[in-house]
Amino acid sequence: MVPGSGDTVNRNSCSFPGLGLVCALVSTVFFSLSSLFVKLVWDLHPLEITFFRCAAQLVCALPPIIYKKLPLVPEDTSPRLYLLGRGVFGAVALCMQFYAFHHIPLGDATTVIFSSPIFIALFAWLILKESYGWFNFVVTLTTLTGVVLISKPSFIFGSVVGIPSTTEHLLGTLSAFGGAVFSALALVMIRKLGKTVHFLVHITYLSVFGMILTFVLLVAFGEFRMPPCGSDRYYLIALGLCGVGGQTFLTKAFQLEKAAPVAIVRTMDIVFAFTWQFLFLGEIPAPLSVGGAGLVMSSAIAIAVKKCLAERQKQ
């Protein structure tokens, strides 16, 4: 459970107790493939890729919503605000993540994005007034150290690490870092809503706000254009389908299972990202990146394990 969500998961409603974790694992496969397709569509602006990703998600989500007659606007005011937050935060996170995928190696971007658990704990302390002890502080420092190893800023490492464009790599890392912050906010909104809102409605809000945000920015920058015929369009279609699959299974995972074990499973996304980077992009991960990834993964797992132990003690 995300810190401060104030609700619990009704596991008895699921005939398969581990279904939430299975959904989390499947979502990591979809999301890692989605990030791979972003890298493959290298000649399109990241905002344009985000727009088409959200459009594909919306096209897939609307028919079942209409068929099931699902309400898009909750009756109560509180869920509306959380849904708006889920849509806005998720859209901003998606834009920043896709920018990162375009400008730094796939494994590096994915690892930095998965520093989001430290921000979940931080938001719980700042907004929800939960405790933020020495454990969280140490984990935060460990994660930030991992991010520094991945970003390899020139004022620390100089020019000996062999990065073609240090500025571009640093900006890409900062974008991934920002994506982690907004992703954490979006996940808090999902957990706060629980099962009160259908997962297809979650996807719809993310898609609508994502399309609005990216379209406005693309028009302002004069970057909007139709993707060329050929492989780019197929990659965009696959990207959209993977986005739908990832969002669907991730939302269901958080609805069926507590956030701590889900967070552990989701770290597999980092492993998949480095695997795709080597197999399909022919890029061998840098030793510093692997070390940084290990620190970030260790931090995420440590936070999740601590939450699991705390839940067991309460029982």
Image: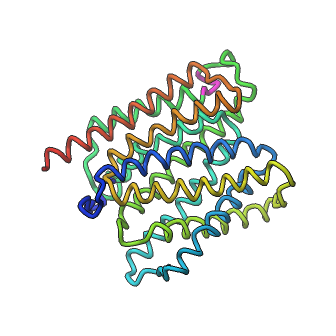
The residue located at (72%, 67%) in the rendering is 216
Quarter of the rendering containing residue 162: top right
Magenta residue check for 174: no
Quarter of the rendering containing residue 156: top right
Q: Position of residue 177 (x, y in %)?
A: 54, 43
Q: Is 131 in front, or is 75?
A: 75
The residue located at (66%, 52%) in the rendering is 239
Q: Start and end of the magenta stretch? A: 152-156
Q: Is residue 8 left or right of residue 167?
A: left
Q: Is residue 232 left or right of residue 27?
A: right
The residue located at (57%, 28%) in the rendering is 150
The total number of labels drawn is 0
Residue farthest front in this picture:
15
Q: Position of residue 73 (x, y in %)?
A: 47, 81
Scheme by which the image is coloured: rainbow
The residue located at (80%, 59%) in the rendering is 221
Q: Position of residue 6 (x, y in %)?
A: 26, 62
Residue farthest right in this picture:
229
Q: Is 274 in front, or is 135?
A: 274
Is the magenta region chiefly helix, strand or loop?
helix
Q: Is 184 in front, or is 160?
A: 184
Q: Position of residue 197 (x, y in %)?
A: 41, 72
Residue 114 position (above or below residue 195): above
Q: Is residue 149 left or right of residue 279?
A: left
